[in-house]
Image (cartoon, rainbow, N blue to C red):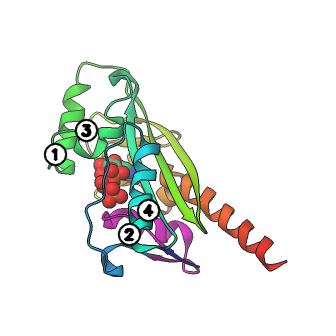
Amino acid sequence: MNLLFATNNGHKIEEVRRILGASWKIHGLKESGVHAELPETGNTLMANAIEKASFIHDRCQQDCFAEDSGLEVDALHGAPGVHTARYAGPHADAGANNQKLLLALQDTPNRVARFRAVIALWRQGQLHTFEGVIEGRIALEPAGIDGFGYDPLFIPEGYDHPFAALPAEVKSRISHRARAVQKMAQFLQQELAYGME
Ligand code: ITT
């Protein structure tokens, strides 16, 4: 199945391809010739996912999905949440974001956090949403080189190392993104199965 993924984040595309396997053809915006800044003006991940998917759906007149994700830290009352990408400033890179997070938690024994992803899918004129969550905690210092964003700091529940230091296969199976994508894939597979009856 071919799917247009309304994102400019190459790491997300790579991960979704790994999660879904070769029978799904995931096309990012740039490789589809769509050069667009995606609007993200909402106050929730859901609102932003819908805004991004709808923006590309309107513009390209074709089925597509978008994903908005964020890190929620209990000791920071759910921050950075919807501001996760820009936690240390509008053009902050992952290193600056990670440093700011470590600083914010430096005197805090409570390291509990979770990643949440919301997918909005436009399919045959209808909007569908899917959510995935992974519980975990924030490490005391960064480790590992895989992944992106906060992966050097986020230790998923049941593991002793952050995503960036775990095999990519683990993240593809249990991450917030994996859980949301698996729900979307199940929905599309069911839809295809009904369509073939
Ligand atoms: P698009 O809007 O183009 O999809 P983006 O990077 O701006 O790309 P988001 O607005 O959803 O995406 O920002 C989510 C941020 O949350 C992302 O930039 C990372 O900093 C962080 N993040 C999300 N998922 C992550 C993951 O699996 N591992 C590490 N950090 C993650």
Q: Earlier in the sequence, mark 1 or mark 4?
A: 1
Kindly identify which numbered label has been placed on residue 40.
none
Q: Earlier in the sequence, mark 1 or mark 3?
A: 1
> Going by the image, does 131 lie left or right of 160?
right
* Residue that mark 3 sits on: 141
**Mark 3 against mark 2, which lies toward the viewer?**
2
Q: Earlier in the sequence, mark 3 or mark 4?
A: 3
Q: Secondary structure at mark 2?
A: helix
Mark 1–mark 2 distance (CA, rounded to whole Å): 25 Å
Quadrant of the image containing the N terminus: bottom right
Q: Residues within 10 Å of mark 3 (few under 14, many from 20)?
A: few
Q: Earlier in the sequence, mark 1 or mark 2?
A: 2
Mark 3–mark 2 distance (CA, rounded to whole Å): 42 Å
* Residue that mark 2 sits on: 59
Q: Secondary structure at mark 3?
A: loop
Report whether the residue tagged 1 is closer than 8 Å to ligand 1.
no
Q: Hey, what amino acid is under mark 4?
A: Ala
Quadrant of the image containing the C terminus: bottom right
Residue 94 in the image: x percent, y percent?
A: 21, 50
- Pointers 3 and 2 in contact (C-beta within 8 Å): no
Q: Hey, what amino acid is under mark 1?
A: Pro
Mark 4–mark 2 distance (CA, rounded to whole Å): 34 Å
Q: Hey, what amino acid is under mark 2?
A: Arg
Kindly identify which numbered label has been placed on residue 168.
4
In the image, the segment drawn in magenta is: 4-26
- Quadrant in which residue 79 is drawn: top left
Q: Hey, what amino acid is under mark 3?
A: Glu
Query: What's the residue at 57%, 51% (across, down)?
Result: 130
* Residue that mark 1 sits on: 90
Residue 1 sits above or below residue 105 on the image: below
Residue 159 sits above or below residue 104 on the image: below
For this orientation, the residue located farthest to the right is 197
